[in-house]
Amino acid sequence: MSENSRVHFRSAAMGGLIVGVMLLAMPPAVAAVAGLVLGTQNTANSRTVLTSGAGSSTLRLVNNGAGSALSLVAEAGEAPFKVDSGTKVQKLNADRVDGWSAHQLLRVAFANSDNLPSVEGDVLSVQIKAPRDGFLVISGGVNGSSVSTTGSYMWCNFELDGQEIVASERLISNKSFVASGDTETIFSFCESSVTVPVSAGTHSVNLHWETTNPNPSPKEATLTALYVPFDGDGKRP
């Protein structure tokens, strides 16, 4: 190697050493501009943009260890990531909706009977747990079977935690009809539905039935209570 070549080599080496020292001495925000350094902490005060014309994913992260491939951390109240499309992402599972798990949203309790005992009173009962304040949508009814007395009545209503829901009360007039010259009895069905606000906790719902018929004979009956977590304005939880 000639003397000139050795001089140029030493100058180049010294220049590289000086640049390296300057980069190490720079604040992290400035040094990061030169490139991201893997395996260490990088800091920047402005956005980093990666644009690609590749025919597949622009960026692919693979973790062969025990951790996740990507961790996104944002300040409280800020979304950890954003998207610009409503297209469904395959295999992207959501554990919560607006911060609530599935069992904290809709719940339903149901009871039915094909042959009730011949008694009046609470013919069906269910219990349902409200994980937070919301509403119960209650519906149901009872078949009064054949009615032997023309002009008799039967009524039904719901009870919530032992208290009658007045708005749910229904009154049915039992009537007979004439078929082929004979007076026949008919089946009368008393049904109702109502929506009531409830607080968080377990609630009991009863279907209550009575009649003026001297021989009450209820048959089929159904009772459904659906918990809905919306507030009084219909807003989301």
Image (cartoon, helix red, strand yellow):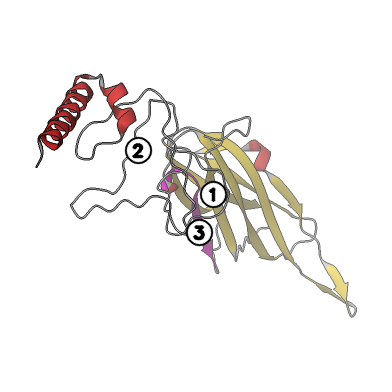
Residue that mark 3 sits on: 111
Left or right of residue 237, residue 148 in this image: right
Label 2 environment density (alpha carbons within 10 Å; few <14, some 14–19, many ≥20): few
Considering the numbered disc 3 on the image, is that residue within a helix, a strand or a loop? strand
Considering the numbered disc 1 on the image, is that residue within a helix, a strand or a loop? strand
Q: In front here: 27 or 154?
A: 27
> Viewer-nearest of labels 1 and 2?
2
Tell me the CA gap for discs 3 and 2.
46 Å
Residue type beneath disc 1 = Ala
Residue type beneath disc 3 = Ala
Tell me the CA gap for discs 1 and 3.
9 Å
Q: Characterize the magenta stretch by its predominant secondary structure.
A: strand
Residue 225, numbered label: 1
Residue type beneath disc 2 = Leu
> Viewer-nearest of labels 1 and 3?
1
Q: Does the magenta stretch include residue 58?
A: no
The vertical placement of 139 against 116, above or below, is: above
Left or right of residue 3, residue 103 in this image: right
First in sequence: mark 1 vs mark 2: 2
The vertical placement of 185 against 73, above or below, is: below
The vertical placement of 112 against 179, above or below, is: above
Tell me the CA gap for discs 1 and 2.
41 Å
Q: Does the magenta stretch include residue 106?
A: yes
- Find the magenta span and give its range: 103-113
User: Residue 150 location, x and y as percent?
Assistant: 79, 61
Label 1 environment density (alpha carbons within 10 Å; few <14, some 14–19, many ≥20): many
Left or right of residue 111, residue 17 in this image: left
Residue that mark 2 sits on: 72
Considering the numbered disc 2 on the image, is that residue within a helix, a strand or a loop? loop
Residue 144 in which image quadrant: bottom right
Residue 212 appears in view: no
Q: Which residue lies at the image location 37% right of the left edge and 30% below the top edge?
A: 74
